[in-house]
Amino acid sequence: MSDTGTGAGGTPDAGAGTGSARDADAVGAGTTERAGTGERPGPDSGPAVRSGVDRLLAVVLAGEAREVPALLESLDAAERKRALTRLKALRAEVRAGKWATPPYVPDRIRSALYVAGAGCLPTAAAAASWLGARELQVREEDKPLALAALGDPDPEWAADLAGRLARRRAVAENGYPLLHGLIVRAGYTVPPTDGYVTGWTWHLSGDRLVERLREDPQTPALVAHALAMAEPPERLTRPAGRRPEGHWPSALRTLVEEGVLDRAQVLDVCVSRLLRGGPVRNLRLPLETVRLLAPDAEELRARIPDWVAIAADAPSIVAGYAQDVLAELASTGSVPVAALAEMTSGVLFRTEKKLVRAQLALVGNVLAREPGAAGELLPAVTEAFGNEDTDIQERALKLAGRHLNAVDTGVRHELAEAAGLLSPTHRRAAEELFGGDLEPEPARPYEEILPPVPEVQLVRPPATTVEELVAELLVQRLSEDPVAFERALDGLVRHAHRDRAAVAEAVREAFPWPRWEHETPYFTQETHEIHESHGIHESHGIHGIHVVLAGLLGLLDPALVDFRRPQEHSTDSCLHQALSGVLDARLWEAAGLVGTDALPFLLATPTWHTGAIDPPVLVERLRQYRDAGVEPAPADLAQALLRVRRADPSARRAAVEAATLGTPAGRRLAAWLREETAVGATVRVLRRDEDRTPRRHCLVDRLVVDLGEQPTVRAEFPPAFQWLGGAPESAPRRCRHRIEDRAQWAPVLPADRELLAACLLPPLAQSAEGDGRGATEPLTALAEAEGPVGRAVLLALACGLGCVDADDRLRAVDAVLVLTARGELNPRRLGEELAWLLAEGAVKPNRLADAARTAAATGAYGTVWAILSAMLAKLPARAKPVHGLGEVLAVAADCVERCGAVGGVAGLDALASGRGSSQLVAQARRLLNALHQGADQPLTETT
């Protein structure tokens, strides 16, 4: 190499300023240990005798990817085979971090490795494995270099390689230049894939979209694939906005008009994709393309069966378009009656009121022109008799009544039988319409249907073998199942106590992470401080139980463990952070003691799936600790005390036995069992004029939780638990950040339902007022926990019933019904809390109506009415009622009609006497009439 700083290829040495190229050249020349071999060459080695393989390795180590293709041209098959052996060794060294210090640049070395390996691998399978390796994914501008390194392969070989790469989505998306070059050399014989099409759209999108599509010979095939994709690339679904020249549907319309794309094929693919359904975001591209193509009547008629199926099953916006298409065709008599009947049955089964009303109107228009079609269409109309909206039921009944004379006796009987689905409010109208054809309503007393009380399940013993333990640790979603988590944690501690070396070896084999060997500083005190400054929590960052695994392997800095174990809850952080901090404290304590005689097993492992521990079981565990001469770990013992069932009948005798153990832990348990009350919490809500926050309209900012004073907890529990003893001053626990580990909260406080509910309130309030999801996940465990049902529990349930997400509301409904079945819920108090939240605007009436309708549909009409009647009675009088209250009144009226409740509701007469025919007035009248008629119906309730 010359003194002027040129590389092996005679070009200026890009690394001369840092010394990296000179060092790499020295490696290739043999003056230092050879890269990838570990060999040290003899003293007579030097630049004069350097082989082509040495020069290639020197360039790769220097990170000069652009020089690799030229060097590969001079290598024969044998040399490339030798080079490949050394490249594989170098790749392993780079992966292990050997070349991670200056002057070497790992990313540049990977790029050069990527290119060099492509030119040395003999088979398409091996080349695909190399080019698709995750750690070798490089910048897009380096991908064409790999194409140059491949030389001029046989078209069949190129097609094989392209096909293998195209089937790996991430590789295809990020490697379009390489893949495109291979496909061109293969003669465009490679079938398109989702990944390749996504990379193609990224490459083409821009202001010259139409021109680029027009010039690309792949366009017809790839456009067809893009339109049919289950999840099309995001840029294809964007609206035109301010850059219509980059709008894909508009570009496709232009190409269809020019004849570049076949119009019939594009329409077929789009309609077929709409027929398959899916989220709206995945259907925007085919829907917008069809709209822009504006199919004529003949093209629409040819696809009537498809439009019928789309109207029945597609998302609302797509179904609405299909309904409009069919309505236009029906106006000219182009839709067969059988197809219209099929469409009507499908659309009327939907829940969208707009679509249902439009379909009833469409059927009415068709029957006005073709009365003879009533025999086929009216049976389909009866699908609306079971609609939850009584207004829709009324429209369907009137439609059937207008055309009843046009049907024969068999159809009339069919319609009368379906009329049994109608709400009781329409019973009289149905009797007048169908007369004797309508079956008499059975006179039987109402029975309330509630779910069975859930039975508590015993937690299985921990794994008996190391193999079984490792299998449990490998479960991907261990943290989402608290019972499985506790079993795995206890099993890990037990087996590590018996044979730490064997468990450590099994963990290393099961978790072959580079972090275990090469990122030990991650677990140091210095790194902890850096992470804390960025809001990162280690125990969550390495998936909870893995911090204990790190302690087992000896990778934790003792200073970090000592720092994390005694952390106290900060008074300015939210309650759920403090709740998660309890688990953190346990994990870090276990991480410091696992595999030692100080932790033979965990005291806090639950007996039952709720997280509770039977008192005699905890006494026996403490006896085993005493006999082994082991002092319980503070956090482990504290959690065990919080989980023990103090209200259980065995608690009194267990307290006596605990006291006789003669140990401090035994005496603590005995005193704890003798205490009659749980920690407890009181929830207050600041008035708007008391709240000084900028967002004073938000409920979450005005929640105040007063923890019950527990001197024992503050004096004897570890720092992470002392917040449970009551703070000196109560303040709103604001919570406006991402929430994790919800599943682990309930087992922390299985015996104190009210305190657990208080901790759940902030995220629940956010989900009711905002757009959060998943906040009600702990409500099932809350319903199965022990302790009184106070205001915190009631507010948690009320917020859950008003959550934005339907799944969240469903979990809240389940919790309400379970507590009712257990006889622990006061429906009147829950209704009063709902009234307050409705008035505050924290709960939206439409969401509450949906939740109440779901609960009532299970057969709990009496329970739902008890809640809603108390809510309606407590709603403050307003000049303008709460918007959307009519939906809630509709559910209340349905409950009264079915359970036969009687009585009055304050303010209902005023609503029912209002003018107009709004839903609020109509449903208030319906509810009032139902309450007056219910006096004659016997009512019995069973649970």
Image (spheres, rainbow, N blue to C red):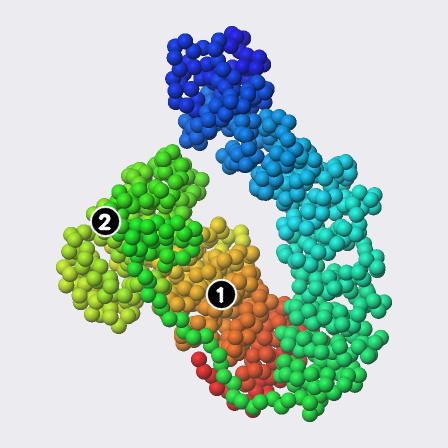
The quadrant of the image that shows the C terminus is: bottom left
Q: Residue at x 43, y 30 (%)?
A: 92
* The furthest residue to the top: 3
- Residue 288 percent location from the top left of the image: 74, 52
Q: Residue at x 85, y 67 (%)?
A: 332
* Observer-nearest of 326 and 215: 215
**Residue under the image location 81 percent in, 58 percent down:** 299
Left or right of 861, for residue 362: right
Q: Mark 2 = which residue?
A: 498
> Separation of disc 2 and disc 1 at Cα?
42 Å
Q: Earlier in the sequence, mark 2 or mark 1?
A: 2
Q: Of discs 2 and 1, which sits in the foreground?
A: 2
Q: Residues within 10 Å of mark 2 (few under 14, many from 20)?
A: some
Task: Tell me the kind of residue under disc 1.
Answer: Arg
Callout 2: SS: helix
Element class at badge 1? helix
Q: Position of residue 763 (x, y in %)?
A: 48, 57
Query: In this orientation, which residue lies closer to the viewer: 157 or 459?
Result: 157
Q: How many marks?
A: 2
For badge 2, the amino acid type reads: Arg
Q: Report the side of 679 relative to 940 (left or right).
A: left
Question: Can see residue 97?
Answer: yes
Q: Residue at x 49, y 65 (%)?
A: 811
- Dot 1 alpha-carbon crowd within 10 angstroms: few under 14, some 14 to 19, many 20 or more: many
Residue 336, position as x, y percentages in the image: 79, 70
Q: Which residue was labeled with disc 1?
A: 811
